[in-house]
Structure formats: structure tokens, C-alpha cells
Image: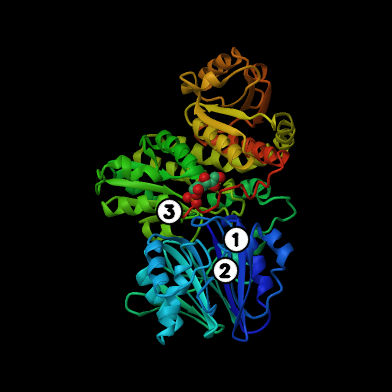
Amino acid sequence: MCGIIAVIQNKGQVAPFLHQALKRLEYRGYDSVGITTIEKDHLFTKKDKGKIDEVHRKHNLDNLPGSIGIGHTRWATHGIPSLFNSHPHFDCDEKIAVVHNGVIDNFLELRKELAKRGHEFGSDTDTEVIPHLIEEKMKEGNTLKEAIKYATGKIEGTYAIVAMSTLESDKIVCTRNGNPLVIGRKDNTSYVSSDIPAFLPMTNNMILLLDGEIATLTTNEVVIEKLSDGAIVERDTIKISWTADQAQKGGFPHFMLKEIHEQPDAIKQTLRIRTEVFEGPAKIIEASKRVMLLAMGTSGHSAMAGRHMIASNSGIVPSFELASDFQDVMYDSITTDDCVIAITQSGETTDTITSVKYAKELGAQVIAITNVVGSSITRIADYTIITQAGPEIGVAATKTLMVQLTALAQLSIAIGERTEFRTKEYLKDRKQNLEEIPQKIARIIAIEEEKARRLANIYHNRPSFLFLGRGISIATAFEGALKLKEISYNHAEGYSAGESKHGPIALVEQDYPVIFIAPKDNTHGKVIGNIMEMKARGANIISVIEENDTDLMELSDQTFQIPAGIYHEFSPMAYVVPLQLFSYYMARRNGYDPDKPRNLAKSVTVL
Ligand code: F6R
């Protein structure tokens, strides 16, 4: 939700880099964009409503002078997408420029107070109070840093703030509370951004900034101090393993398609995580009275599948709760005997972070599964498992789902080794099966991609779809439906096939498309029954089946076929792949950009 980038370098024009960095952050929001630079004690700005390419075509974002600048790509919360609401925002004298990601809860009150004191506002945003608060303090003779400290004392809410001023044009100052900011350093240049890919082509030397800290970036150094007492924080530079190539399209038309193709490799990388990483979490889970999986969206579907993996391999049956509703269903019943497994690819989703903090306050142990080193969740969790998808730029999650499922599968085996619910041989065999999945997924992509494209041509204008599965395949059905609706905007509902006859079947009429996820597991016979019920009402059946499942081939109008020999608890990893491809080609057939679905942002940092 909103992407921020700022750079200070000792010479050369910074705007072209800011423009490209914003392109790499566009997945965080794309309803407006802006860049401000400083040159000879003046601010220069280009900003407007629209996607970056549109705004660049209109205004040439590269054509700004100066070697210090800030940029922002917006996902609107307060104020419609418009030129005036685009960031950066300024003080009355246009000497201070600010970009912000987050929500200032008390902005109305602050705005009224500031207006009474003569400040004039040019936007409807919550952000704009920040430069005006900074302005007041700087006018009293304080430095930019001191003025930002003052502003953080006044505002309530969540924020990542980056500011610069013509009055101190040799520095950028930034601070955060609940929204991400990472700092990059190389030679005579300092960077700060919402996410690593923004500066990845220039450096993979990253410095974390934590909540409650303020950083001053100059060309020579980065100085971090605590907001509370000004104490200097010594923080090591982390070398991250992601490469700039991973954040490029690499010849694919969209990031989403590239990321679907990267899944076999992402699983392989995640399978290389040392087994010891799973031992601490497995011990906690075994010892806990209650184990609760928490997540949102696609990560929630990983959690639903993970529940089956853990149950089937260890005999412990965790619950799954949507992080957004966790507090409302727990009624403060959490104790020190409980354990929470939070799954979030970004590590920044506010729903998830908030409920994890709540669980921890009440004494629960927290295990996090995330793809981002140093993200907020890693600083709350007792144990963190870092998945190895590399950067995911497409807004719709694909390869991060895959690595979450991989990590959950590994975790389920590690717990099983402790509980001895299954024999050693059984679990060894599971591990072997998991190792074979990347190659099977590569085969699915090679064979089924063309079919996905063909079926998208047939089904693209159907207004509504049902996705049905039983047992663990309910998670796959939910994910298939989510992918389709979020990027192709066809209405799609994921449902339990068992439950479908208790209501959703009323939707079915002649030729209504129903997609069944039907691996040859213990649900197979019952799924055939559900297919018969749907066919009897004229449904058009598309099934995702094990290859050469002749019964289902006969019953279905269309099939996607999955190689045999995948154990049922790992089946979502393979069975979801044709559904990802189908959604991708549906979006394209319907004329939408699969990488940038409307109204969505990759990292949802509001409640
Ligand atoms: C869907 C999607 C979202 C995210 C959800 C949680 O394709 O990407 O549903 O899965 O917003 O995000 P994380 O995993 O970052 O917590």
C-alpha cells in the first residue's frame, strides 16, 4: 500500500533512477505517482493521477534536476486518486517535501488546528498534516530531524515517512511506525524505500530501520537513532541474496507469468532451508495446547492447506483463523499454552501483524512464515521461517503461495518426527515425495499452459464460476476462485464441494461453469457424487484431475491433468498451478493487466 523511494547521491541527476525504482514498487499501489527533487535550494516536482507509465508519458518523470529526491506511488486511502492528492506533499512555503505510507488516524483534528494557525492545505490527504507540522517546528529554528521527531509526537496511526527540505538539502530523514522502510547503501549513495527491489539494481546492502527509530541519510553515511531518547543505534548491514534479475520480467510479458514459471525453482530453494530451522517451531507446536494458523488472502489458503499437512503428518490438528477476525473470535482466551503460526509473504500485512501482537501480549508463542527478511513479523515472532521465493512483484500471489506450502510441508514433517504419529519410514517417504514436486510442477506448466490459454478463450466472458473441492482441496478451490476474481474480475466462488449442495447449487443452470479440484485421494468418490449433482443441473464441468483418471475424464467437459504420485497433503501445490495459469490467461483475454489488479495492492497495511 503505497511505495516510497528516496535517494541521495553526490552527483548526477536522481530522477531517472527514482522513476525506475517506482516502477519496481508499482505493485504497492498504482493510482497516482510523484517525484520531487532538490536543486539549488528549490523543490522540483512532477506528479499526477494514473499509472507510472501514463504519468511519465504526460510529464516526463526523468526530466527533473538534482541529485537528491523522493518518490511515491499511491494506493488511495484518504482522498480520491487525483493530482492534488498525489504525493509528495508540501508545507505552505514549499520548502519541505514529504512522502508517506500508512494512515494518520487523528489527521482531521490536526488539520483543523493547523488551519486555525494559518496553514493552507492543497489536498484531502491525511499525509499533508505532516509537512505542515514539520514547517512549524523548523520555523522555530529546529532542524529537519527535530521537526520530524516533533511531528511523530503529534500524529497517531501508522506511518513510514520520508522527508527532505531545501533548508537542509544535504540529507533525507525518515522514520516509521508499523509500515516498512529499508535503507540501502553503496559508495556515495544512500537509499530508503518501502521494499528492497526498489534499489536492488544498485545495491543488495540493506540496513533495517525499526519502529520508533529515525534515520538521517547523507551521501556518506546513515545515522539511526531512537526517537524516544536520541540514542544512536548501531545496526549491521545485511547482504541480501535477492538479485536484480529476479525483479525483472526476464522476457515474460508479465511478472505474474514469470513468477508462475519460477515456482519449481522457488520450491527447490525453500527445500534447502536447514532442517534445524524447523526444529524450534516443531517443539513449540508439539508442546502447545492449541495451535492456531493465522493469515489473510492467499496466505490464508496456505494456512488452510497447512492445517491438513500438519494434521496428516503429526496428528496435531491446528485451527485456522482469518487474522482480521482473530481477536473477535478469541475473546481474550489466549494463554501461554497457545501457539500461533502466522503466514504472510510480505511480513507487513496489518491484519496479521495486529493479531499476532495481540496473541503475543496474551502470552502465546509465535511462529512466522514469511518471504521477507527483516519484515515486521520477523521482529515479533519467537521463531521465523524465511521462505525462498525471491521478490514477488505481481500483485496476485503465486510463487509465495508455493513456498509457504513448501515450508508448511517441511514443518508438518518436523512436527511428525516429534509426535511419532507416523513412522520414520512414512515421513522419510513424504520428504522424498516433496523433493519430486518441483519437477512435476515444471511438467504441469509445460503441458497445461497452452490448455489454460485455450480454455480462457472459451470461458472468458462467463460472468460467474464455482470452484469446488473437498478436504484439503477446499484450499485449492478457494485459491483458484480468488485468483480468477482478483485479476480477471469474473465473479468466482470457492466452496466446499460437500457444502455446495446446501446453497450454491441454486446458481447452477445450463452451461454454468463449475471447476472441480479432484485429486485421487480419499475424497475422490464423494467428489464424483458432487460432479453428478452439478451435471444433473446442466453445469459445464472443468476438472483438475490426476492424469489418466478415466472416470473424471468421462464426466468432465474439460480437464487439467496433474502427474500421478503426489501425496494428498501436498496436492494443492500441484493442483493450484493450472488455476493460476487459467486466471492469468482469463485476465489477458479480458483485456486486464494481471500484474496490477484494480483496487488491490500487494501489501495491505490498513485494517
Ligand atoms: C492474493 C494476495 C493477497 C495476499 C494477502 C496477504 O493474490 O496476494 O490476498 O495473499 O493480502 O498478504 P501477505 O501474505 O503479504 O500477508
Indicate left or right for 165 with 65 as reference: left
304 in relation to 600, above or below: above
In this figure, which residue is indicated by the disc labeled 3?
350
| Residue 529, horizontal then vertical, whole percent | 53, 15
| Residue 223, horizontal then vertical, whole percent | 46, 80
Badges 3 and 1: C-beta atoms under 8 Å apart?
no
Q: CA distance from mark 3 to mark 1?
A: 19 Å
Give SS at disc 3.
Answer: helix
In terms of sequence position, does the residue under pointer 3 or pointer 2 come before the other?
Answer: 2
What's the residue type where badge 1 is placed? Leu
Badges 2 and 1: C-beta atoms under 8 Å apart?
yes
What's the residue type where badge 3 is placed? Thr
Q: CA distance from mark 2 to mark 1?
A: 8 Å
Give SS at disc 1.
Answer: helix
Front in this rendered view, residue 543 or 105 = 105
Model colouring: rainbow
Indicate left or right for 607 with 91 as reference: left
Residue at 40% in and 73% down: 151
In this figure, which residue is indicated by the disc labeled 1?
25
Badge 2 local density, few (<14 within 10 Å), some, or many (20+)? many
Q: Is residue 280 visible?
A: no
| Residue 582, horizontal then vertical, whole percent | 66, 36
In terms of sequence position, does the residue under pointer 3 or pointer 1 come before the other?
Answer: 1
What's the residue type where badge 2 is placed? Ile
Badge 3 local density, few (<14 within 10 Å), some, or many (20+)? many
| Residue 433, horizontal then vertical, whole percent | 55, 38
In terms of sequence position, does the residue under pointer 2 or pointer 1 come before the other?
Answer: 2
In this figure, which residue is indicated by the disc labeled 2?
5
32 in relation to 288, above or below: below
Q: Is mark 3 within 8 Å of ligand 1?
A: no
376 in relation to 121, above or below: above
Front in this rendered view, residue 492 or 117 = 117
